Amino acid sequence: MRSSTSNSSDRIPGGPWRAIWITSLIIVALALASIEGAARSHGHVPSVVDDPALWSQVRQRLANAKSPAIALLGASRIQLAVSPDELEQQLPAYRVYQLAIEGSSPIATLRELADDPRFGGIVVCAMNPSFAASRRHEEQAGYVQYYHRRWSADVLANRMVRTQLQQRLVACNPSVNLTRLAGYLMKSGDFPPPLHVITYANRSRRADFSLYHANSLRPRLELEAAADTTLKEISESALEQCLADAQVVEPMIRAIEQRGGAVVFVRLPSSQRMASEREFWRRLTAQTAAETIDFEQVPGMANLQCPDGSHIDQRDIRQFTWALAGELRHRGIVDPRTTTELGAVSE
Amino acid sequence: MVFNSFTFAVFFAVVVALHSLPLPWRVRKFNLLCASYLFYAAWNPPFVILLWVSTLADWFFSRAIHAQSVERRRRAFVAGSLAVNLGLLGFFKYGGFVLDNFVALAGLVGIEFHPAAPDIILPVGISFYTFQTLSYTLDVYRRQTAPWQSFLDYALYVTFFPQLVAGPIVRAVEFLPQCVQPVRATAGQLSWGLSLMVIGLFEKMVCADGIFAPIVEKAYETTLAPNMVSAWCGTLAFAGQVFCDFAGYSTCAIGAAMCLGFRIPDNFRFPYAAIGFSDFWSRWHISLSTWLRDYLFIPLGSSRGGSFRSGVNLMVTMLLGGLWHGAAWTYVAWGGLHGLFLVSERIWKARFGALKPGPRPLRDFAYAQATFIAVCFTYVFFRAEGFGQAIHFCSAMLGAPAASAQHCFTSMQMLAGFAGIGVMLAIHWLMRNTTLEHATARLPWWIRSLVLAGMIVAIFLMPGEDRAFIYFQF
């Protein structure tokens, strides 16, 4: 039989392998301890790396939920605005699951929940004209597909170990990852500044904009804000198109409602009060079967500031979350009783 | 289960520990077989059944072929093996592709046909293990080997976890003889095996995922047309990504096998230092290129029957090689371009003589870079979402970007992309005529320590998004 392959195993390099490995491991331990210490002294804190596996883990928790559930959908704005822990404290009968995905329209996730016959909870979904546009509807489909096709016990176990490490070690935080570290050291000779956003194991996030003002992140984030399409006025024809595209969610809302659930669209705070977004919201409220909450109409939300134009600071999360909980209660979307009370009633 | 996961680290430590116990050789092989099924089942348990189907089918077909002396019946059994293996591959990998093309074809003749979208999950590694079992049956049919007597050995050959899901595609004659005598890794094998795994993980997690992938995604996962610099930066980064991803996996596989005392063949030999395309294919995905040569190109007639027939055989081989990589016409185009380059090279060689590396290193270097640039053009088709994007990229790379072309990258990303591929090309060129083992053997022990430590620290400091190995999808 012909085969031109060779085996590297036939040419094993000799040498004092025990010394090589022991020395290597000592260097690794020293280097990582030094980086960990230096990062902490520069203000870096542990942060979890968000990815499809972490999203799938939260999605699976939602699928296995015994208590009534609230799923948070949207993008970074709702991730940074709502604390699942605070919301659970405010609405003790409910467990809250953060399924928002940065920089993407939530329609694919909403469709997935609507298609899941076991889901009959409440969906709190951030919405704006850009998310409604049909060209963006599949942006979260990759995460949904990952959950349905690649999620397994192996991925879960691996993700759990990674989360444990990332929660404890700053050296695992992307703010000190190798490319960022090398970039800053080459550019300015300095250790990179901490990032202003921290992610937690439940996928909630907090943004500390005092860091944003204090260090060199500001120019980059201002550029990002300038490119944020949700902060720009849109034409009447584009607005009409977005509203027409938004019709796609109505069967999804019906499906969830038929199972005893509810869908609530939320207009999240932004620093620019755009006339076109306000108009979109007015017309969406008229055309949709879902409940709608407009931050401008809710006292606890209307006065919140967005330092970068579209995200709220960590110091305002509690206020926003409490206001959201109050609004959900006020409209009768959630049951104000606790799980124990609900259990007692059902008995 | 993937090599760059904590679960694999635990799994592998347990497997190595079990394999080192003073148990009978048969029990240790059985442990490895069970571990291999567990490794595969961790991804999607029901698909282990496909592995069993492929294993059992070729076990019985090869024995039936060997027992038969009537050629017609021997051929019928080979056809059976081909039907089972290529049937599995065809259904799971090409089912949707065939349906899409059928719908498009029907549309061309005016027939509106809207079938339900097939929801078929591609079993990981199916292209690799079906080719591996097929090679065994074909070798028996060609009387190049006799059927192996131990089913346990044979099942382990098909299922051996280091190479199961993304190669190298190991031949039976290379693996099965290793199952006869008890093997256990020596201290040197274990150390070098672990070193290879660190090198492979460094290639995958730091180079492919950390440095190149974000650049590639920015260039290719957008609706914007790139300008010339962005198209080159994105494509060069993809050349870096696909090599580091796949060679990283192969290096890990070889290392993992070595830690268990087994030898599996090299799959890459610094391909970006290739001078010419036949040289490239003797250095890139060697186990596939030799498979295609031995089981497709040679049976088609090889170079017999004149230069035209030889060219046709080469084109057919490369087109099918392209299709093996994925169910899309862009992969076929990728294979077709490589076929055209190989045919052109043959014509050149016939007219002007072979390009042999010689005393003029600068000329050789220029030829190597020309080869690499041509290979980069083929990568555009390999990576692009469709022909439209591929044509945009090729036009931009040739200096004719679209009118709406934009610059995609920050200066740091450009630096990372160009510097990364520059370093890789330099390493490939310097290592062109040597091996990793020889180069390592020449280094003082403390430099080896520093390099290993540097790689481990870099792996630890690259906690990026969890990206699957590119070749898993094939």
Image (cartoon, coloured by chain):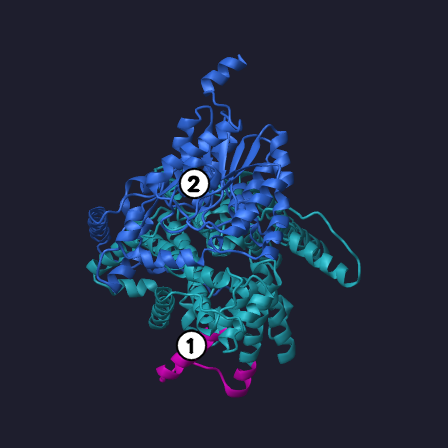
Q: Is residue B2 visible?
A: yes
> In cyan, which chain?
B
Instruction: Quickly name the residue at label 2.
Output: A302
Q: Which residue bears the numbered disc 1?
A: B368
The residue furthest right is B110
Farthest residue in the top direction? Answer: A347
Q: In the figure, is residue A277 to the left or right of B254?
A: right
Q: Is residue B221 left or right of residue B107?
A: left
Residue A144 placement (x, y as % from top left)? 53, 44
Which residue is nearer to you in this view: A14 or A156?
A: A156
Looking at the image, residue A218 lies above or below residue B41: below
User: In the rendered structure, the residue with mark 2 lies on which chain?
Assistant: A
Check the image and report above or below for A184 versus A304: below
Give the residue drawn at x 51%, y 51%: A275
Q: Residue at x 52, y 77 (%)?
A: B400
Image quadrant where residue B241 sits: bottom left
Q: Residue at 56% of width from left, 64% of height from top? A: B292
Callout 2, which amino acid?
Ala
User: In which chain is the residue bearing label 1?
Assistant: B
Separation of marks 1 and 2 at Cα, in angstroms: 64 Å
Q: Magenta segment range?
A: B347-374
Chain A colour in the picture: blue
Q: Nearer the viewer, mark 1 or mark 2?
A: 2
Amino acid type for the residue under numbered disc 1 = Ala
